[in-house]
Image: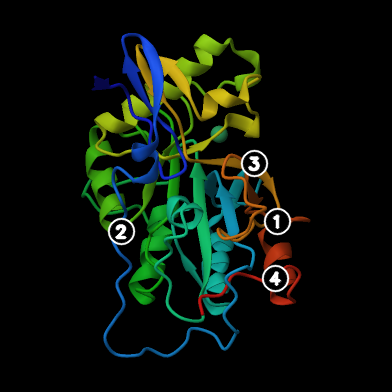
Amino acid sequence: MSRVGPVFGAGAVAALLVGGVFVLDSAEAKSRQDPLPEIRRSEAPTPRVTKRLGNRQGAVLVLMYHKIGPKEAYMVRSKANFEKDLDRLYRLGYRPVTLEEYSQNRMPLPRGASPVVLTFDDSDPTQFRLKPDGSIDPNCFVGVWAKFAKKYPDFPVKGTFFILPNGPFGQSKLAAKKLEMLRGWGSEIGSHTMTHTALNTLTDAKVSWELGASYEYIAKLGFTARSFATPYGIAPKNRTLLKRATWNGRTYGYENIVLAGSSPAPSPLSRKLDRTRIPRVKAYGGELGINDWLTKMKQGKPKPYVQP
Ligand SMILES: [Zn+2]
């Protein structure tokens, strides 16, 4: 009996191929293959990040970014506004966690803090660029965030990057270096398919290739992709493929699947959380964008998750 393909996660059911027939292994389903590190608690008590009462049932902000540039535009966050986002999040007591940490309820948060998940789609070159001297371009997302994190080390460059095979982030020769930097800060790498095609236009076989081949692409880069963003937020006609698709004799599935909009996500402890449909908030200034939801959540509509 041999294990076939990466099916993962506490909630996922492991598939084993026995004589060409899939069987379910419940023992495998109970234990994670690759558990996240235990949450470390510091010895000395540290002051609470906010005076807000603990609330493990509160909502979680999962933000969606695409490109950064000098001016705000459709799908482009201006550098000035991204700086403001980080500053406002920090002052309101938000601290970054990855999508996987949020979804699996393993958020290493200080007391009184609220989680925020910063997600970046498309591995656009403006997200992470290195200059010829090896330093981080101060105008890319990672550059702005790294500068902020230097000032506020408790807001590290820890996000979820849904990547495409476009380098990733262009500069393919520097990809390994960039990914090691992201890993060092605790960021997560997720899949965004191979070709960024709307999945409802593809056959089941093509969808399975998009899911499996991108998993393998990310595996070659040294990461296990547990999170997935559907291009344009559009699911395939056969939605079960996202959790279980067979390509090239292997079975693939993703634990955490995000949508494209437009509200905060339920607490990881909430029964309302469907990990295959995690809502995100668009990082722009308009209605139901980041500014709008930060104001609403400050007013308790909805109340944010707060680490007790
Ligand atoms: Zn995209």
Instruction: Kindly report which numbered mark, 3 or 1, lies closer to the viewer in this rendering.
Output: 3
Q: Is mark 1 on a helix, strand or loop?
A: loop
The residue at the point 57 percent across, 68 percent down is: 84
The residue at the point 60 percent across, 21 percent down is: 199
- Cα gap from disc 2 to disc 4, whole angstroms: 27 Å
Q: Which of marks 1 and 2 is nearer the N terminus?
A: 2
- Cα gap from disc 1 to disc 2, whole angstroms: 27 Å
Q: Which of marks 3 and 2 is nearer the N terminus?
A: 2
Determine the image quadrant of residue 149.
bottom left
Q: Position of residue 31 (x, y in %)?
A: 34, 46
169 in relation to 252, above or below: below
Q: Which colour scheme is used?
A: rainbow
- Cα gap from disc 1 to disc 4, whole angstroms: 12 Å
Q: Residue 84: in sight, yes or no?
A: yes
Is the residue at mark 4 in contact range of ligand 1, meaning its CB lies under 8 Å from it? no
Residue at the spot of label 4: 297
Residue at the spot of label 3: 260
Circle number at residue 185: 2
